[in-house]
Image (cartoon, rainbow, N blue to C red):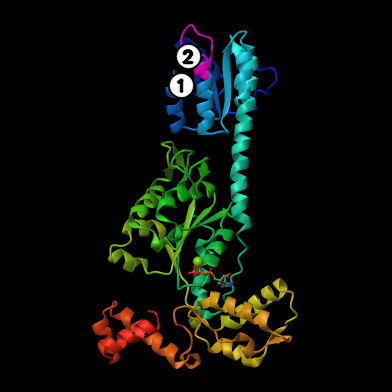
Amino acid sequence: MKQNPGSEPNSKISGSVLVADDQADIREALRLLLKVEGFAIETAGSPAAVLEALQHRQHDVLLIDLNYARDTTSGAEGLDLLTRILGFDGNLAVVVMTAWGSVELAVEAMRRGARDFVQKPWDNARLMTILRTQVELSQALRRAQMLEAENKLLRAQGRPTLIAQAASMQPVLELIARVGPSDANVLVTGEHGTGKEVVAQTLHAMSNRSLRPMVTVNTGGLPEGTFESELFGHVKGAFTDARTDRIGRFELAHGGTLFLDEIANVPLKQQAKLLRVLETGEMERVGSSQTRRVDVRVLSATNANLHEECAQGRFRQDLLFRLNTIEIHIPPLRERREDIPLLAVHFLKQYTTRYRKQITGFDAGAMQKLMDHSWPGNVRELDHAIERAVLMARDETIKAADLGVVQTRDGGVRIEDMSLEEVECLLIKKTLARHAGNISHAADALGLSRSSLYRRIEKYGL
Ligand SMILES: Nc1ncnc2c1ncn2[C@@H]1O[C@H](COP(=O)(O)OP(=O)(O)OP(=O)(O)O)[C@@H](O)[C@H]1O
Ligand SMILES: [Mg+2]
């Protein structure tokens, strides 16, 4: 075997090359040469075959002849092919082969974006140097692309602090300690704002994937049309808006952790697609038939009861089994009141730093108010309440008045703090919901006539 003088025998870069030439003997000669040099190689005999091959596999370098119509040396077909390849993916490394003496054609190809050229008959050593350089460049470029995308996601994610001293949190902490370091898929359940994402981040931070990213997807929040493209990525041209290739979340999480948030909201059709990747570890980008393998640990979270969703036929049982190898349920804040002061102080520190305020703590009245509240919005509600209090406070301690009326979405305001009209409105809303919007039944239950219920519905804009 002839060794390229410039390269060390054991520093060979293994790369994959797609060779395109209409002459079978040339394809064969290149196949033998490249195989000996340790490249993976695929061949194509026509421009159409090249474009077809691109759909199925990713190559580091494309080595293409410029002349396809026999007895011509214009290179028009080859230049056209080059343009189409780069239109498919502008980052692809293309090296062109031209007939001896057609330097102008080579120059034109370089102008159109070819990375390099060789003249036929080629010099083996020069060809190998060119291919190795291009393989190295391609792989570096792809790594850089990957890193950039990862970093963008990482910057958006904070480091987790998990405060949990209450007795009711001990089983949660034990489970986290036991399954955190493993590769097990974990489903985290609990009401809104209980800290499901914090638990997922903690599990990831404890695992040996922690140096790789945890990539989060709000699966429930994805519009129907973008679900697949977000998760699996797409290739340029897969649909009207797909102007460039895009790496999906599964690929971004490769080697790391994928956090599927709000998992119960994934429609059945898309559940099937998720199931397949989880079962096989294989997926394709939208618009491509090239199968890619991904190695991800999947954590997921929901505030719904997935077992109930399965029983109702809204969630696939087989998908649930893939997700909940281990299930961690986080109790609501009202069942772990011991944690309220600790969390309150934690958020206080965070916000006094952020808003540069000199506040040292809570006075007794404020703390009492925090302990008395039912926190239907859980830790997130507490977080927001402290943020507001820090902004409102005029002294060095937070007073009950700074906490204001602790409001929540779902009518979670304390009845004592509401006006009569607010209570009436809330009652009507709840009754309507209980009777699935049936006016007659709701009116009966409220002891109102249908028409007076209608008047109130109109008044409150329900
Ligand atoms: N145990 C905890 N220690 C410290 N901070 C916490 C804890 N639990 C929750 N938080 C904080 O409370 C807020 C809400 O937590 P998180 O987003 O994890 O809740 P969630 O259960 O995912 O909520 P949702 O169901 O609305 O998505 C975050 O700011 C988080 O940092
Ligand atoms: Mg969440």
Q: Amino acid at mark 2?
A: Tyr
Q: Secondary structure at mark 1?
A: helix
The residue closer to the viewer here, 178 or 361, is: 361
Direction from residue 440 to residue 30 in the image, left or right? right
Picture quarter containing residue 156? bottom right
Q: Amino acid at mark 1?
A: Pro
Residue 22 image offset from top left, x and y in percent: 46, 14
Dot 1, how many residues are within 10 Å of its Cα: few (below 14), some (14-19), or many (20+)? many
Is any part of residue 211 visible from this angle? no
**69 drawn magenta:** yes
Q: Are marks 2 and 1 in contact (CB under 8 Å)?
A: yes
Placement of the C terminus among the 4 image quadrants: bottom left
The label on residue 47 is 1
Residue 424 image offset from top left, x and y in percent: 39, 89
> Residue at 43% of width from left, 37% of height from top?
288
Picture quarter containing residue 312? bottom left
Dot 2, how many residues are within 10 Å of its Cα: few (below 14), some (14-19), or many (20+)? many
Is any part of residue 393 visible from this angle? yes
Placement of the N terminus among the 4 image quadrants: top right
Magenta residues span 67-78
Main SS category, magenta section: loop
Label 2: which residue? 68
Label 2 CB-ligand 2 distance < 8 A: no
> Residue at 36% of width from left, 54% of height from top?
271
Residue 195 image offset from top left, x and y in percent: 52, 70
The residue closer to the viewer here, 199 or 231, is: 231
> Residue at 58% of width from left, 44% of height from top?
146
Above or below, comparing residue 347 to residue 157 in the picture? below
